[in-house]
Structure formats: structure tokens, C-alpha cells
Image (cartoon, helix red, strand yellow):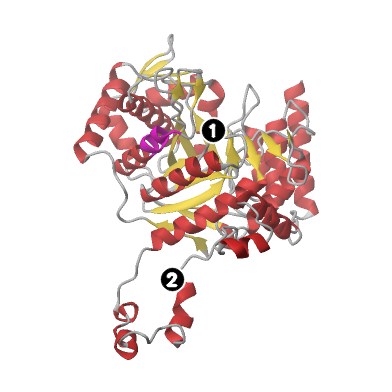
Amino acid sequence: MTIQGIRCDRPLEFLAAGDVERIHQATLDVLATVGVRFEYEPALGTLHAGGCWVDFDSRVARFPAEVVEQTIANCPARFAFRGRTAEFNVDFSPQTVLYASGVGFALIDRVTGQRRSATAADMAEMVSLLDTLDSIDLIFDPLPYLADQPQLLNWEYKIAQYVKYARKAGLAPSPLGKIDPKWQILICEAAGRELLGDVTASSPLAYAPNAARFIMLMAEKDFPLAVYGGATPGVSAPATLAGSLVTQNAEVLAGIVLAQLTRPGSRVLYGSYLLPMDMRIAAVVSGGIENSLLYSATAQIARRYNLPSLLVHPATDSKIPDAQAGYEKGIQWAMLTLSGLSCLGGAGQLENSTLMSYVQLMIDDEIIGMVKRLMRGIAVNDEMLALDQIRNVGFFPRQYLATAFTREWWKREQYLPKISDRHPHDAWQKRAATDVVARAQARLDELMRRVELHPLPETMCRDIDQVLEEAEKHEAG
């Protein structure tokens, strides 16, 4: 059994077909005339051998159009990604939408409501909760920093804790700094798991040494990889949205070309970290309407190359689960699903993808459920038209409430919310007059009483710990 995602056969598109082609041609121009800098010698050698023009002194590779077109054509449009067991496998394609958790370097404590650093125990609890939510298809990188784990290899200890406890398929970004990315792969191999890698260009138009090495390692190991552009309009890309899309496209395609030249047929996703900046306060924006426009266009451009797409969004600039978080994320959940983004990873995250909230996770779970119902649309067939019901009931004052047809279909046709309140005012007051945050907290408390940890067998956990010990000795030396 594989999780297929929600079909999106008629995606919302803001770019005309001719506009997508102009962005593509502009991207080919940038790649051929400006190029992309790779701060990793083996990457330059692979690109040179594949037909790119490489200046090894400046570490800049320029890409002939035919090399780009031919290598992108090697990418599979659809591919599977394994969870711990078959029921958690997922299927990526440009025609379906999957949903995933968000990211937070800090955590809002689910009991005290206070902001704090996360721990290894929090990671085990968080992924176990995510495993139980039907709305969540994958687990991204929910808690990237664990304060109680060794600092040098914190990234690796975090991945180890994820694979020990999570059953759903998951993503892990390329490591920060100079730590060898091979340790992430060895940890996943010890757990018998695949790793969905996540690598971001150093915008504008560059890849750091570890990022380029990570691309090549993932391709060599035949692990799937999301390649992101990292442009910020007006900062690391032109201030115009179209110019930023060209910059992002050049960065993403350059990374994908490297992956395909390393191993033709590598599984890749087209990713985006495009974040506008509010120049009034010098802060990047994750909840703006321009984010939705840029990500919708990203999905459309990815479909131009027949590639699945991925975002660590929807996101919000709000610091707490409030109305701002609701409208910013709600717009994005709906608009980006309608736009056909292949995977949206933002459930639970706040404050520009730096803070995880259990309560926000419950609210996002509700929104995703509503959006999934939206995507089911309205079925029109002989049974759904219900002509026999209309004929049998006829005229007022007769009604449909007591019919077997109503009893069968009303729950199947409607999404029944878990935390939204629909009671009249008096009934709402009698039920303690709670707001959505309080109801989300109540649902969270109920779920956590039932959540169970599902660690890997002890032998696998020991193998993972052995990899961490080897990594510590190697990196510390």
C-alpha cells in the first residue's frame, strides 16, 4: 500500500503558458552566460565531464542548453519513497498533493505553553504524534535542533532520533557547516530507511561545498532529493517576482543537472525557499500573499519539466496560534493545494518556520482536512443527482431528514471538523465558550493520552548509535 496523495488534475495557474516558456528561456540564458558557482571540486569535474563549460579557477560552471534539457529529461516524473513499512510509503508525482509536518528550531511546550528548546524526548513524542494524524502523509524535519544532544553532531543525532521512532517517510536537510553528509546516509542505512534529502543553493547562484557533495552522495546512493532555490527578492535575486523565479529556476536546475550527471534517473523534487523581504523592517516574510504567488508559479514551472515539487510551507510570520496564523496559513494551504504543489510541509510551524507548536499542528490538521474535502469536489452521477429522492419527497412541507439516503450520505458529503465550533451561541456558552486554541489544546491532550512510541528494534538502535560514535571520533579528530 502506498499513500498516493490528493489528485490535482486542473491546477490553478497564474502564469500564462508563454510566461512559463519565457522564464525557461531566461533561465537557460543565465545558466549559459552567467553560470553557477560550485565550491566543490568533484562537482565541477562531474559537470565538466557531462558537457558543461567549467572554469576551475573561479569554480563557475556554465551550462549549455542542450545539457540542461537532456539531463532534466532523465528525471522520473513519478516515484515512490519508503517509510518504515509499506503502509507509510508515499508516491510523488506532479499530479498529486501530499501533506507534511513543518519545522521549528524552538518548541512551544504542549503543557506549559512556554517557548523552549526541544530535546530528544520531544522528537520521539512529536514524530509519534505525527504518525497518528491521518492528514499528515510525511514527516519533514519538525525539530532540527535538540538542545540535549552533542553540539558538534546535533544534526546527525536529530536524524538518528527521527529514524528510531518515526514510521512515516521523512525528510532531512543537508548538514550545516563542515560535517561530512555521509553520516546522515549511514544512519538511515543502519535503520533500513530511505532518506529524502533537502539541499538549498547559496543564493545567488552558488552551492556550498557540503551542499554539492550532498547532491552527489544522494544520487550515488539512489536516495530521493529535493533541490531548493534560496532566492530572496531584492536581496539575493532581482526585486521583481519574475526575476526571482528565474534566479530560483537557474539554481534548482543546476543542482538537478549535477544529480543527474552523477547518476542518471536520480529521483529529484523541485523545491523552493523563495522568501520576500519586508524592506521596512529588514525581515523575510513567510505569510505574505506574494509567497503564495511565487510558490504557485514554482509548481507551474516544475510541471514544465514534469517534476514533482516540494515546499516547507505553508508558513506564517505569527509567533503564536492566532488569527494571523490562521489566515496566512489557511490561504496558503488552500491556494497551494489548488496550484498542485506535490508536497506541502508546514503543519504546526510558526514564526517563519522557526517554531513548532502542538496547538498549531491541531489547527493545521483541521485546515488540511477541509482542503482535502475541497479537492474531492462534487461528484455528479446518477446516484448523486438523487432524482428518485426529489421525486419521492416532492413538495413542502415534506422533507428529507428521515430518509435512508440522508442518513447514508450527509456524513460522506461533508467534512466534519474536530475543533471548529458550530453550535449556536447559547450552546457554545454552555460548553465553556472556548476559542479554537482551547479546543485545539483539548484535542491535543486527548490524542497524547493515546499516542504510543514505536521505537526500532534494539539491534537497529545499537547500529545507529555505533554510527554516531564513529562520526564523533572522526569529526572530533
Can residue 93 be seen in the rendering of this structure?
yes
Q: Quadrant of the C terminus?
A: top right
**CA distance for labels 2 and 1:** 34 Å
Residue at coordinates 51% horizontally, 61% vertically from top-left?
A: 2
Q: Earlier in the sequence, mark 2 or mark 1?
A: 1
| Amino acid type, callout 1 | Asp
In this rendered view, identify the residue nearer to me: 345 or 393: 393
Q: Nearer the viewer, residue 56 or 75?
A: 75
* Residue furthest out toward the bottom: 392
Q: Is residue 289 magenta?
A: yes
The residue where tag 2 is placed is 413
Characterize the magenta stretch by its predominant secondary structure: helix
Frontmost residue, 437 versus 472: 437
The answer to whether 343 appears left or right of 242 in the picture is: right
> Is 42 inside the magenta-drawn segment?
no
Q: Which mark is residue 317?
A: 1
Q: Is residue 44 left or right of residue 423?
A: left
Q: Quadrant of residue 184?
A: top right
In the rendering, at what x and y percent does residue 145 appear? 69, 33
Q: Residue 217: x, y in percent?
A: 54, 34
Specify start and end residues of the magenta stretch as a single range.
288-295
Q: Secondary structure at mark 2?
A: helix
Kindly indicate the quadrant of the structure image that contains residue 239.
top left
Q: Amino acid at mark 2?
A: Glu
Decide which of 266, 355 is in the foreground and name it. Answer: 355
